[in-house]
Amino acid sequence: MNQSLESEGFVLLPGFMPEALLERVRRRVDELYAEEGDQAGTEFRLEPGTRRLANLGAKDPVFVELAANATILTLVRQVLGERFKVSSMNARSANPQSNSHQPLHVDQGLLPDERGNSVCNVVWMLDDFTAENGALRVVPGTHKSGLNPVVALADPAAAHPDEVLVTGQAGSAVVMNAHLWHGGTANRTNAHRRAVHSFYCRWDKPQQQYQKRLLPQAVIARLTPEQRTLLAIDDPLNDELSTASPNMSGFLR
């Protein structure tokens, strides 16, 4: 068991991505931003001061490879238990000299329930995360509070006395219990701060982005059996959950 993930609610994996993989992901993300232009991220949500991409599993196999990484899945399993699935795959880039400072939040506004934790997020750093360029801030241990900071705090956008910045070099990854209070900070530099997010939910929750509907058949045909399971392509319960519930667009970094 990873003790940091258990007690603090997150774990930083420095230099986790091999250089060739990092460059491949960077290149594809930049290509997608260029191709989609002003429409980038519109099939999910837009956020002032940022560029976003959504539904990445449909756009390149490399994003499914990231989400299916065995080491990452072991850590996600620690948070969510044996049965879970990819909920969405997105990208977020904090614009240069922007005020894209997020309030502290829990993903999708969800709190642990009688079955335990229900959401887990992985942030893949495509650029260095620094104190100046929009790094993730977290309040360690709050994944066990049972509280939503949007409700519990007078001003969720304000600095919290116990918050810490999660900084690291490009190629690092952060696995986070998404019930942890967290948010992106403002980018005060002259360069973009890019990241990819693979977001997971427990088996009995609807996917944030219903993969079976969003992935083209040609993409689904290329998936391995393990990837099909992870994306819940053949899960009747997931079909029921996802068709009964609209996709949710709550904060994700």
Image (tube, rainbow, N blue to C red):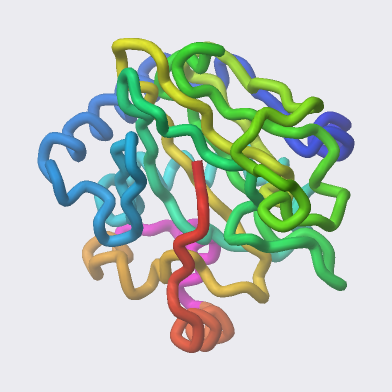
> Which residue is more in the foreground, 91 or 151?
151
Q: Which span of residues is magenta-colored?
A: 222-234
| In this picture, residue 105 sits left or right of residue 248 | right
Number of numbered discs present?
A: 0
> Which residue is more in the foreground, 154 or 11?
154
Q: Is residue 237 above or below residue 120?
A: below
| In this picture, residue 32 sits left or right of residue 228 | left
> Which residue is more in the foreground, 208 or 25?
208
Q: Quadrant of the N terminus?
A: top right
- Percent position (x, y) of residue 249? 45, 62
Q: Residue at x 54, y 51 (%)?
A: 199
Q: Residue at x 33, y 30 (%)?
A: 25
- Percent position (x, y) of residue 245? 50, 82
Q: Residue at x 73, y 44 (%)?
A: 180
Q: Is residue 243 above or below residue 55?
A: below
Query: Would residue 74 be seen by someone viewing this image from the given angle?
Result: no
